[in-house]
Image (spheres, grey):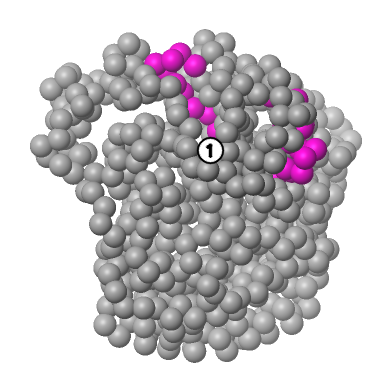
Amino acid sequence: MAEAAKGAHKAETAPPRMAEAEGTPEAKAFLEALRAKVGDAILEARTRGREVVAQVRPDRNVEVAQALYDMGLEYLNCLCGLDWVAQNRLEVVYNVSSLSHPVKVEMKVFVPRDDPRVRTVVPIWTGANWHERETYDLFGVVFEGHPDLRRILLPEDWMGYPLRKDYEDERMPRFDAAEKKRRARLFSRDAEAPAEGEEK
Amino acid sequence: MATRVITRPPTADELMATRASETMEEMYVNMGPQHPSTHGVLRLLLKLDGEIVLDVWPYIGYLHRCHEKIGENREYIQIIPYTDRLDYLASMYNNFGYVHAVEKLAGVTPPERAEYMRVILGELQRIASHLIWLGTFGLDLGNFTIFMWCFREREMVLDLFEQVSGQRLNYSFFRIGGMPMDFPEGWIGDCKAFLEWFKPRLKEYDRLSTDNIIWQKRTQGVGVLTQEDARAYAVSGPMLRSTGIKWDLRRNDPYSIYDRFDFDIPVGERGDVWDRFWVRRREMEESIKIVEQGLRDIPPGPIMAKVPTAIKPPVGHLYSRVESPRGELGDYIVSDGSKRPYRYKVRSPAYVNLSAISVMLPGCLVADAVAVLGSIDIVLGEVDR
């Protein structure tokens, strides 16, 4: 495990930064309205273009989701997980938009890696069902209150969560450092490039 | 809301109990994973009361191949060939969605001519994809002739693609920052000739499908999806439009140069299988219009922007979406400033559309299950990733 974490990208030690483009007036007004409703649940929020990017307290995600739904964002585009292994936390990202509203929202929730739990948003956006199952399947995030939380892409008896950065499958071949280096070069277009992990 | 309650599949004990019961009022039936009309390997567990479907649980993942994990271990440009294999019936559009996302993240603007090439190839791909859908859907309904006819024209589109990229199916023809090669000499003429050949063919298909009483009876009023359910499940593409919602990302959230083209967005009325067919059928006409405008307006000039060989987008994250033949193809990319994406997620339209089968199928006859499933237009390569 430790070895895999070492091999991961170094830049992840920096906290995830949100892009700084200026937001449109609609997005800014939307963020103000959202703050007025559930301001205390929002840890950090900014606008970029037509999008509002908001980091939300993990225990209040359903509240914010309901507020977003009530404000007209009825369409859950995407829900996915992210593993920030160096900060020892997982992230759940909700991309929400509307079929009539110009504003899009990206809601982010950070949960600890050893006990990742958030409440489900299936009662609000039914389409979250499979997305949450997938995030559970590949990252191990437990969505409390989900009506049917099973693995979806992997077999039911699979062990571990493959999209976590430190995931290792015992059945996979193991390579020593020299072989790893050789293979990293093999998959790099630039033959002179240093192997993964030695970068920078 | 009652229709949208998510139920658990039966446990092994419950399955055994129904098998042991003498009345056999309720029965569980497996459809697939090896079934000609599941278009790949999909298993549906159906709960039946006689011939009526009461509930359905799809089991997917038979084709899961860790697309996203592979993506995290490849350089940005090396992912392009993998995107071909997502939706292998619309590879051009998967390329399109991916390179568009990376370009937005890295702040690269492709040259004008490359954008036109993308739109032309993308719309031809939409025609090819809808053709294969129409053909296999006809096969699902027992209409073999339309299958042969559609494949004949699809093969012509593939020939055009082969002239451009050298490949029939997995083109990998888009690059971050533009296109690798221009159209070969005489290609635009060939493309125009194909469109002229293709337009009257649509009328021929109509004689086999639209005007066919059996086709109408098999599809009309079957597998209805309401607007509320479509929104709740975030269904997209022709399935969303068939419910009467006029929503097309090419028009409502224009990307690339789609705002320059004049085309209509066909919508349905009731959201049944017929409407899904009819929306796709008319979309082919709109795609022809777009290709014709593209061929007319395409400017000369460079086809590739100046981009470094190893693209390193700045630290950031982005959700970008395009309208693939199946619906909203989203790419969520998180960059940590290195050569490889830190996280690369594909929101595949077929995955989301398939999840809505649990509101469309209950209440249908078993015989219609095939029609409903076929009308979603799933590609398992994209569902399972």
Q: Which residue is mark 1?
A: B61
Q: Which residue lies most toward the left here?
A: A192
Which residue shows up at 29% across the image and 74% down it? B301
Which residue shows up at 42% across the image and 61% down it? B92
Q: Residue B68, how many percent across, how many down?
A: 43, 37
Asked whether residue A58 is drawn in magenta, I would say: no
Q: Of residues A48 and B290, which is closer to you in this image?
A: A48
Amino acid under disc 1: Gly
The answer to whether residue A105 is above or below residue A57 is below
- Check disc 1 and report its element: helix, strand or loop: loop
Residue A83 seen in this snapshot: yes
Give the residues drawn in magenta, as a range.
A61-89
Residue A146 seen in this snapshot: no
Q: Of residues B219 and A86, which is closer to you in this image?
A: A86
Q: Residue B56, how many percent across, how many down?
A: 74, 41
Q: Of residues B181 and A185, which is closer to you in this image?
A: B181
Which residue shows up at 46% across the image and 54% down it? B97
Placement of the N terminus of chain B among the 4 image quadrants: top right
Q: Is residue B62 left or right of residue B369?
A: left
Asked whether residue A64 is drawn in magenta, I would say: yes
Q: Of residues B166 and A195, which is closer to you in this image?
A: A195
**Image quadrant where residue A169 sits:** top left
Which residue shows up at 78% across the image and 48% down it? B229
Q: Residue B9, how many percent across, how many down?
A: 72, 31
Q: Is residue A176 left or right of residue B51?
A: left
